[in-house]
Amino acid sequence: MGEFDLIAHYFQRPARRAALGIGDDCALLTPTPGHQLAISSDMLVSGRHFFADVDPNALGHKSLAVNLSDLAACGARPVAFTLALSLPHANESWLAPFSQGLLALADAFDCELIGGDTTQGPLNICITVFGEVPVAQGCSLALLRSGARAGDDLYVSGTLGDARLALDALLGKITLPAEILAVARQRLEMPTPRVALGVALRGVASAAIDVSDGLLGDLGHILKMSGVGATVQVGKATQLIATDPLFTWSREQFDAQTLASYRRTLALAGGDDYELLFTAAPDQRAAVAAAAQASQTPVTRIGQIDAASGLRLLDAQGQPVENTFVSFDHFG
Ligand code: ADP
Ligand code: MG
């Protein structure tokens, strides 16, 4: 199968909202009046972001999901995306499930594939997504990292740490019972971008980011760009590990203290969570609850923003917890 047959067969579909889709030198998009474009790219490299033998359907899903998660963090609604794909061979038993996983998620979020590039080379997937955010009275409603203010509440959506738990098991660092691995692996390989929550938080949240490299590391980006500090209730975060109630398996592998510290690492520095971490003024608590309900996304208050710079971690007794958690950094 040649390059152009491959594109036509696996990726080209009739244009829907795009004025012009795949096939010409450029795609054409007509912006919705009164909106700004929100644009983000993420690259997934074989052996770095995923195992070369990962289920291609799940890989297609995740490649787009991590990009949609960036739109969610800005409160943008997805519109379209491009796909730059480098492939060792035009392997149809890989391309068919990859494109199915990718396009199924695209359809679920009404986000149209409008173009891309295809080359032969090491497996590498680069997606650029385009979303829209309304502008009201000359002000963008996009959620930014820079808007957190002292006194704001700090929230995170969904669950934390399960993707890292699965990764550690797949890397052979820990041993998980099959049924727990299945739950955790779903979180690693098939993350759900929190688009509806991001949209519902427009005008409610003061700052937001998606958690991709680990909760504390990503919180650090909000703190730096907002010029504030924060206090995090560590126990609230560790309670968000979905597989936590199943941690009875771990007694054979860890003593109590090591387990407590491992749970903190999972929740605070796990990475690949693709949840939204956001801040909102205390008078917005009812509005945050309404946004969570409207988007059917659980949200938990895990701390607060402080005027004093730096990050403080407190345990359930209010005692300080030393911050030894390291977030993912490709060149770190
Ligand atoms: P050009 O040489 O002008 O860059 P190409 O020949 O590379 O264009 O691509 C032909 C058409 O197919 C273009 O519309 C391009 O956007 C689209 N395309 C190429 N690769 C992909 C892909 N992996 N997914 C979706 N569209 C693609
Ligand atoms: Mg061209």
Image (cartoon, helix red, strand yellow):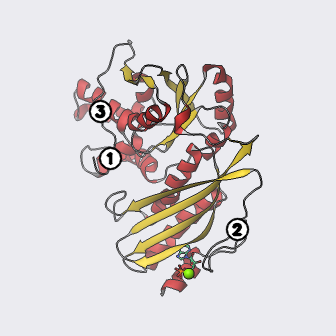
Quadrant of the rendered image containing residue 108: bottom right
Above or below, 109 against 57 in this view is above
Q: Residues within 10 Å of mark 1 (few under 14, many from 20)?
A: few
Residue type at mark 3: give it: Tyr
Q: Between disc 2 and disc 1, whose residue precedes?
A: 2
What label does residue 262 carry, if any? 3
Which x, y percent locates residue 237? 43, 28
Q: Is residue 145 visible?
A: yes
Above or below, 60 against 296 in this view is below
Residue at horizontal 24 percent and vertical 29 percent from the top: 258
Q: Between disc 1 and disc 3, whose residue precedes?
A: 3
Quadrant of the rendered image containing residue 183: top left
Residue at horizontal 48 percent and vertical 56 percent from the top: 62
Q: Secondary structure at mark 2?
A: loop
**Identity of the residue furthest to the front in this view:** 138
What label does residue 18 carry, if any? 2
Q: Are marks 2 and 3 in contact (CB under 8 Å)?
A: no
Quick check: 57 left or right of 105? left
| Residue at mark 1 to residue at mark 3: CA–CA distance | 19 Å
Which x, y percent locates residue 134? 71, 46
Q: Secondary structure at mark 1?
A: loop
Which x, y percent locates residue 249? 31, 35
Quick check: 15 left or right of 66? right
Q: Between disc 2 and disc 3, whose residue precedes?
A: 2
Above or below, 275 against 60 in this view is above
Question: Is the CB atom of the residue marked by disc 2 within 8 angstroms of ligand 1's nearest atom?
Answer: no
Find disc 1 in the rendering and name its residue. Answer: 329
The foreground one among 79 and 26 is: 26
Which x, y percent locates residue 215? 42, 36
Quadrant of the rendered image containing residue 31: bottom right
| Residue at mark 2 to residue at mark 1: CA–CA distance | 36 Å
Q: Secondary structure at mark 3?
A: helix
